[in-house]
Image (cartoon, rainbow, N blue to C red):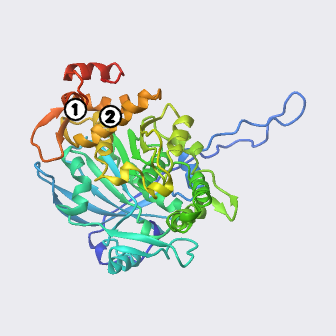
Amino acid sequence: MMHPVLKPGALLALAILSSIMLASCGGGGGGSNERPITASGDPETPEPVAQSCPATFEAAGVPTQWSFTTLSEQRVSNGDSGFRTLEYVRASADQTNSYFLYFPSADPLAPVIILNEPYDGISWTDEGVDASFATLGPGRHPDKFAPAYNGQDLVRYTPETSAPDGGSLRASVSLWLESGFAIIKTYGRFYAGGTLANDVSDAVAPWYFIAARPETFAGRQVFSTGGSWGGMMALYGAAAAPEVVQPTAIAVTSPPSDLPAVRGYASELESAEPTMREEIQAFFSPYVRRIDASIAVGSQEVSSAFSAEALCRCLPDRVLVAHDDADTIVPVAQTEQLQAACPEQVQPIFWKRTSPPSVEAAGLSHGDFGGRSSAPDVSTLLSAWMLSQAEVGPVVVKVDPESFHGFLSMVAAARSRGEDVSYAVAALKPLIAENIRLRASDGSSEIQTGAAFLATLLEVRFGLEVTAESVSSALAADQLPF
């Protein structure tokens, strides 16, 4: 979350400052500003000029002028291939700050991935709000730093284990370190308050950092990913990115993509589930307060920048969105409507059920994505989708056979109901890419091609007579192998 700039602290002893001032929209040229006259003598109304995407979001409170300071550096293990120098970076714009970690790659042309983390707590910023929460420790605390605090709302604080060679930080970046990517992990610091526009600013800061270092990043692929509110950050960060940086692909899970609709859904849910009204209000209120601060004044909506329509206009060409239709926090309708609005850009993957559970029965959750350990099938599919497009050599991705069996069973059931399951082909096809290898997450040392893994799964779990060759041939022809 972005906050007022503080005076430089001790961390700035290693400060390295780089600045970028990127124009977001074209300036007017010289000459007459008179409107042309039609044959009837009436002034001719000029065609409206579409605002650039950065300018659209700048008008909604997302900055386009940034400076960057390296607060400190740390040498970290790169797994089996040496070490990297990790940078702790402060991004400053409009008297506010964002923070991210930058892991450079050994290969100067390696792809870059932006990891959007909205909730993890960090304590290396030298800001009072982070120090305050670090003192409070893990748990739920008053959400008093966000707009319009009502004296009741709580926000969860989970500190990130900050040792880069172990703990939660290492776990979140290990695949990309081992794959040779340069990594930027950006922090939304939801606990620290701010508005929706601030969270999008936290997400867009890494894109301006990339633009500010053309000698480092020019010509490199750039990916971005995140889940839930982090998925929102990944989508809007890429949409608001400076025009000199072209996102390669975005992969997200359960993202709120139309923020005014999130407000409406929360209100409808309260009315539909009166026995859960207090729980629903307590969960959604911190989000609604942040959304309202950026899109509305009272009941009057003042910004449309955070709608599906604006998002579609500014998204890159390749966006993968995974969504469980049992999601009671971000309804699957959000992704269905986003895909319908921009079908050429958005490829969904659905986890579909015959009858999704009610909120009363399931509680507030992201469905299976929140009920299993890191939703292993989702993680594998999204990682493989990005890696299959990346200019990298063979990469080993962990896979959980049990969760994949569940996903394929849902696909088979949806197909038997006569539903369109073409999304499953898009989900599975990256597994047969030449650079993708799979290894079971149970500690097995066996490494398989994606086609061999699927063939074994279909044979053992479904009793089908298939081979790696037949699986590969079917998916290459955009058909399911079962």
Element type where label 1 sits in the image: helix
112 vs 46, nearest the viewer = 112
215 relative to 3, above or below: above
Q: Where is residue 462 in the image (x, y as percent from the top left)?
A: 26, 29
173 relative to 49, above or below: below
Amino acid beneath label 2: Leu
Residue at mark 1 = 457
Residue at mark 2 = 408
Is the C terminus in the top left, top right, bottom left or bottom right quadrant?
top left
**Tags 2 and 1 touching, CB below 8 Å:** yes
Is the N terminus in the top left, top right, bottom left or bottom right quadrant?
bottom left
Residue 69 seen anywhere in this rendered image of the structure: yes
202 vs 232, nearest the viewer = 232
Q: Where is residue 337 in the image (x, y as percent from the top left)?
A: 55, 40
Q: Position of residue 167 (x, y in %)?
A: 21, 63
Q: How crowded is mark 2: few (under 14 residues within 10 Å), some or many (20 or more)?
A: some
Question: Which residue: 24% across, 47% down?
Answer: 176
